[in-house]
Amino acid sequence: MSACAKSQEYGRAAMPLVIQKFGGTSVADADRIRAVADHIARTRRHGQDVVAVVSAMGRETDELYHLADLVSSTQPGRELDMLVTIGERKSVALVAMALADLGVDAVSFTGSQAGIITDNAHRRAKILEIRPDRLREALAAGRLPVVAGFQGMSQDREITTLGRNASDLTAVALAAALGAELCEIYTDVSGVFTADPRLVPEARRLRELSFEELLEMADTGSRVVAQRAVEYARNHDVPLHVRSSFTWEPGTMIKREYHGMEQAIISGVTHDESEAKVTVTQVPDQPGVAGRLFRALADSHVNVDMIVQNVASDGRTDISFTVPKSDLASAMEVARPLLDDLGAENVVADPGIARVSLVGAGMKSHPGVAAKMFETLSDAGVNIEMISTSSIRISCVVRGDFVEQAVRALHTAFSLSSPDGHAP
Ligand code: ADP
Ligand code: ASP
Ligand code: MG
């Protein structure tokens, strides 16, 4: 849609619309809030309409969850969501005030006021619909909306949250609903890097990336843009620009793959320490056993990720799978009582694992990436416990203590610091 056609939607002279999302570190204190307001005001002066989406200041959301832990072991979802949404409510009001000082007519909105309608699942609500009438009216009146990230209102008109790190999702969903040209994700690093720059200082910033690649990176532990936000951006074709709110320099563009786009064999190495491994030992090698186990896990909402069934010997086999650490206790509770029924020997929990992955669209057409990955890990003395692949990703489960070593060894072996690197 052209900028002109878009502006007619909210009935004012043509100004292309950009969504600017600021994460917790970007608004961590008063100075940061003034710097963010300054940047928003500058964008507006340069002829763009802006809708800002803001996270809670610094670690405030963690602190609110901690406070809940101190007073309650029940923590009803409704009350928890009422509590933690305060963080974003505070930061949007402060950003709007800082904008007012710069002469910008800004107006803050909660998720509910912004028309973000969700299902009734507290703590992990899904967006069902966006009714951005109030945002459109504000824009049409020349005002600048500042929207609280991470929250919405359920069909039952209760306050909900969309899951941890979901301000990214709020921003992308508003970009789609308002027909914005671009959704900018401002954070504390200057883009998407070939590995977490905190772990690999020589990691290189990527100029551009496809939705598919960023989705695999987000799926395998790179939290720079939340996984659900990338998925939403891909499904609604919302271009993303990940960049720094400290240096304001151009960062990484993420869009649909198009002909001529740089297709790196490997775009990055990711790691994830949030999962644990469960092994059910000595399972009879018979049809139906895996079905019964994984049906019971699914019915208990345990989120199973990788699965490996070892080769059977003596008609028996081990089945291992990974789950988020937060689901480990439930997975054990589901699996233990099933042992007799399955005819299995034991179930063992192992929280000491981590996953290291290589992601790259170009690996589809380049054989040898997996071989080189396994050789590199072996040379670094890292044992591989499980392997899984997609067409643009290879993941290995390793001991948690070895994951940083594994990331660095792979980053070096595939020459990811160099723009011409990554030959298998
Ligand atoms: P925000 O609070 O702005 O949402 P996050 O902490 O959620 O920020 O995400 C930014 C962090 O993501 C960075 O500080 C960085 O450590 C981490 N990160 C992990 N992997 C990558 C990567 N491949 N490229 C850039 N950042 C990454
Ligand atoms: N403040 C929320 C969180 O910490 C949402 C976000 O920052 O994206 O999870
Ligand atoms: Mg984030």
Image (cartoon, rainbow, N blue to C red):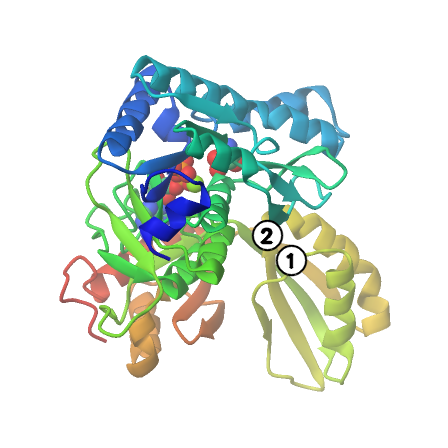
As drawn, the label of residue 303 is 1
Q: Residues within 10 Å of mark 1 (few under 14, many from 20)?
A: some
Residue type beneath disc 2: Pro
Residue closest to the eye, 12 or 133: 12
Tags 1 and 2 in contact by the CB under 8 Å rule?
yes
Q: Which mark is residue 401?
A: none
Using the rendered view, name the quadrant where residue 419 is placed.
bottom left
- Total number of numbered labels? 2
Secondary element under disc 1, as helix, strand or loop, is loop
127 relative position to 15: left or right: right
Mark with earlier residue (1, 2): 1
Kindly tell me whether residue 339 is visible in this rendering.
Answer: yes
Residue 13 vs 417, above or below: the answer is above
* Residue 101 horizontal side relative to residue 72, left or right: left
Task: Name the quadrant containing residue 308.
Answer: bottom right
Camera-nearest label, 1 or 2 = 1
Where in the image, quadrant-wise, is ligand 1 located? top left
Give above or below for 421 relative to 146: below
In this view of the protein, which residue sits in the foreground, 127 or 411? 127
Q: Which residue type does callout 1 highlight?
A: Asn
- Residue at x 30% of width, y 71% of height: 258
CB of mark 1 near ligand 2 (< 8 Å): no
- Horizontal and vertical percent for residue 371? 33, 78
Give the residue pinned by disc 2.
Answer: 324
Q: Point out residue 41 in the picture as x, y percentages from the top left corner.
A: 28, 26
Residue in the image at 56% along x and 66% along y: 306
Q: Residue at x 28, y 32 (%)?
A: 44
